[in-house]
Image (tube, rainbow, N blue to C red):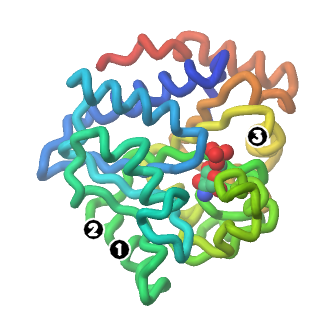
Amino acid sequence: MRMIIHDDYDLMSKWVAYYVASQIKKFNPTPEKPFVLGLPTGSSPVGTYKNMVELNKQGKLSFTNVITFNMDEYVGLTEDHPQSYHYFMRHHLFDHIDIPPENINIPDGNAKDLEKACRDYEEKIKTVGGIHLFLGGIGPDGHIAFNEPGSSLSSRTRIKTLTHDTRIANSRFFDNDPDKVPRTALTVGVGTVMDAKQVLIIVSGYGKARALQKCVEEGVNHMWTVSMLQLHQHGILAVDNDATHELKVGTVAYFKDIEKDNVDWRQFEI
Ligand code: GLP
């Protein structure tokens, strides 16, 4: 597992956007051979999406041959509800880039048969040949997508009940009222994320410091589902300084040293 430590959120976001762009460029996607990208919501990726939109507007990065799969969606919010992940993705990314609408996939939290929607989602990922790069964020309890503590580390797309903790964390988008946060969500599983060829997780701010410490310095544990990244062949953590506050000085020094030539976004050929 790699960890790239950036001075602040803006530098981290730029690095992630340029990394994603460089991977898409290198792959040279075509209609017959599209690049398949997994995407998260939350405040962590907002800066990354801003940079991706800019690269698209500058003509440096095209999404014409990119297929996306989002990680999760609340159950029961309409697609135009301002807190639905459908709305979030349109607002922050899809409305501003050249991706064909039919290439966008987000779990359907309003499906009549939610279990079937989950099975179909997994099937569709398989049909397009799997995900090349899964971008993600984490919750303060170390959850990846909505794989709350105790989730199976080989789980697939399914319905999950959100913890009280997560509903409090996400209530900042729901008039600060945890009761307004939906109780369930559809989410890709930890196994779904880990099947991707590469996994890149964005971790920002003091609020994530404990989860980052569990993920980097302790063992693989279902109580911190992001720690599964330790078993991935190509797992990267892109973090800012604030998120490293619970790590040992030696851990931070080690990753800063080993990644010192890789921390500058200008290295990527776009
Ligand atoms: C939600 C999402 C996660 C996301 C997390 C963190 O719980 N389901 O995928 O990583 O929020 O959000 P933020 O980046 O806003 O801290």
Question: Does 40 appear above or below 60?
Answer: below
- Is the residue marked 3 within 8 Å of ligand 1, measured from its CB? yes
Looking at the rendered structure, the kind of residue marked 3 is: Lys
Say what amino acid the circle numbered 1 marks: Glu
User: Would you say residue 44 is visible in this rendering?
Assistant: yes
Q: Which residue, given by chain and number where applicable, does mark 3 sit on? A: 208
* Residue 240 locus on image (x, y percent): 67, 25
Q: Mark 1 to mark 3: distance in Å?
A: 32 Å
> Are the residues flagged by discs 1 and 2 in contact, CB closer than 8 Å?
yes
For badge 2, the amino acid type reads Thr
Q: Are marks 3 and 2 in contact (CB under 8 Å)?
A: no
Task: Tell me: is circle 1 under 8 Å from ligand 1.
Answer: no
Q: Element type at marker 3?
A: helix
Q: Crowding at label 3, few (<14), some or many (≥20) Cα neighbours within 10 Å?
A: many
Q: Residue at x 46, y 71 (%)?
A: 78
**Mark 3 or 2, closer to the camera:** 3
Tag shown at residue 127: 2
**Observer-nearest of 176 and 115:** 176
Which quadrant of the figure contains the N terminus?
top right
Residue 221 seen:
no
